[in-house]
Amino acid sequence: MAIRLYDLAGAEPERRFSPFCWRTRLALAHKRLDVETVPWRFTEKDVIAFSGQGRVPVIQDGERMVYDSWTIAEYLEERYADGPSLFGGAEAKAVTRFVAGWVDTVLHPGIFRLILPDVFAHLHEKDKDYFRTSREKAIGVTLEAFAANRDADVVSFRQSLQPLRRSLQAQPFLAGAAPAYADHIVFGGFQWARATSRFALLEAGDPVAAWRARMLDAYDGLARRAPGYDA
Amino acid sequence: MAIRLYDLAGAEPERRFSPFCWRTRLALAHKRLDVETVPWRFTEKDVIAFSGQGRVPVIQDGERMVYDSWTIAEYLEERYADGPSLFGGAEAKAVTRFVAGWVDTVLHPGIFRLILPDVFAHLHEKDKDYFRTSREKAIGVTLEAFAANRDADVVSFRQSLQPLRRSLQAQPFLAGAAPAYADHIVFGGFQWARATSRFALLEAGDPVAAWRARMLDAYDGLARRAPGYDA
């Protein structure tokens, strides 16, 4: 039986833009597990109330429910230990946490500032009020004002990718010769942007752009086939 | 026969302050290898000319010479494969490169700005002209002007440690339950500061400070016994 993934969707049900759901989607593909995704919107809290919290990703694997992308990755690694490893051992998993910390505190805030109005434009109508109100409360200005300087902000954003660039100048993937969960974590951010925005995050010659292309092709082109813009 | 490490020293020969040499020193301790360190100053290029380049760390292991801290770590991991692993496997090594990229492009530049005149104050007299001239050429202002706003700069420095903090809130070391090369890489930066500066990089309650204390105690207190200031 396929694992069910509750997956954040836009107005178009196939437009999946949550960076955290993408981590889980890629982890499931990495483990070669069948998945049945359920499009979910921010305001459908009742649909995932069974999980005891209000955010996706949530997976249902037979009797077992798991939420939070990191916890899901740990669950899949243990439950499906026979499949390709998501981490490559205990030390690799521990060091991958640092990558997650960097993505959550540097990469995601950087991307957020560049694409926020584009994300808003792709939301289902029923999510728009919720999204605008909650995000504007968090950022203290309108969505549009927040991203108004993105042509300048993208310069410091690209500069902030130096750790990633260094790594990808030395090897094809963050996890080495092939992608693993460290790559899923970082790529989720880029897929969030790709699903919602035409704004060019990267310059063409950037080693990060070459890696992003490899990630779009990985797992039989799973990420490339998803609705998005190739900016 | 002990491995010989050419190790950057200040005016006092036992004051060792290179963050890259500290990576190697800790890696050698991790592998439980005997080391004989040779205090080396920036202007003693002739002493390491046999390595074909002008920077430390350089190690001499019997007939074998290796330079560059990452290359040394790879060499030690392979040559002394029976000792405790520096990485914990191929994937862990690959992901550790991201940590190195972050340290080289975020942590070190951040620390450099806070401690530069303190580093200068501890140099051997024969290194001072070389250091001032080369560094001031690189930064475009005097050493003193570069660090003049450190009471303000330390706020953004501490903010830049968020990825580290996230990881260390979840586990005792970057590499998990015990330190490994990912920890050596990051800690080298803090030991560079400790060897040369009384300036407090961290606030007392910071999880990063608690990890730093664990790293000072690791390997029988190797780093804590080295000359430095407990700021």
Image (tube, coloured by chain):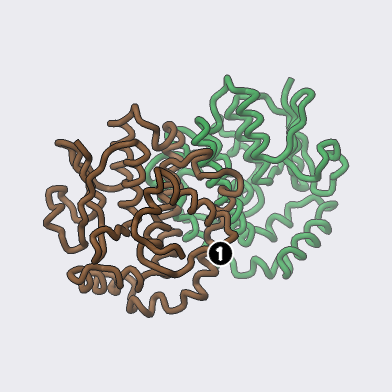
Chain colours: A green, B brown
Residue drawn 36% across the image and 78% down it:
B144
Residues packed near mark 1 inside 10 Å, few (<14), some (14 to 19) or many (20 plus): few
Q: Secondary structure at mark 1?
A: loop
Does the image show residue A154?
Answer: no
Which residue is nearer to you in this view: A24 or B90? B90
Residue drawn 63% across the image and 30% down it:
A28
- On the image, which quarter does residue B189 sit in? bottom left
**Relative to B65, is B144 above or below?**
below
**Relative to A70, is A105 above or below?**
below
Please report, as a chain letter, where disc 1 is located: B
The residue tagged 1 is: B203
> In the figure, is residue B122 to the left or right of B189?
left
> In the figure, is residue A209 to the left or right of A150?
left
Figure disc tally = 1
Residue drawn 38% across the image and 80% down it:
B145
x, y percent for residue B182: 44, 44
> In the figure, is residue B46 to the left or right of A83?
left
x, y percent for residue A192: 64, 48
x, y percent for residue B154: 50, 69
- On the image, which quarter does residue A57 sit in? top right
Q: Quadrant of the N terminus of chain A?
A: top right
> In the figure, is residue B150 to the left or right of A149?
left
**Relative to A37, is B55 above or below?**
below
Does the image show residue A191?
Answer: yes
Which residue is nearer to you in this view: A64 or A2? A64
Residue drawn 30% across the image and 58% down it:
B16
x, y percent for residue A32: 60, 24
Seen from this angle, which residue lies furthest right?
A46
Q: What's the amino acid at mark 1?
A: Glu
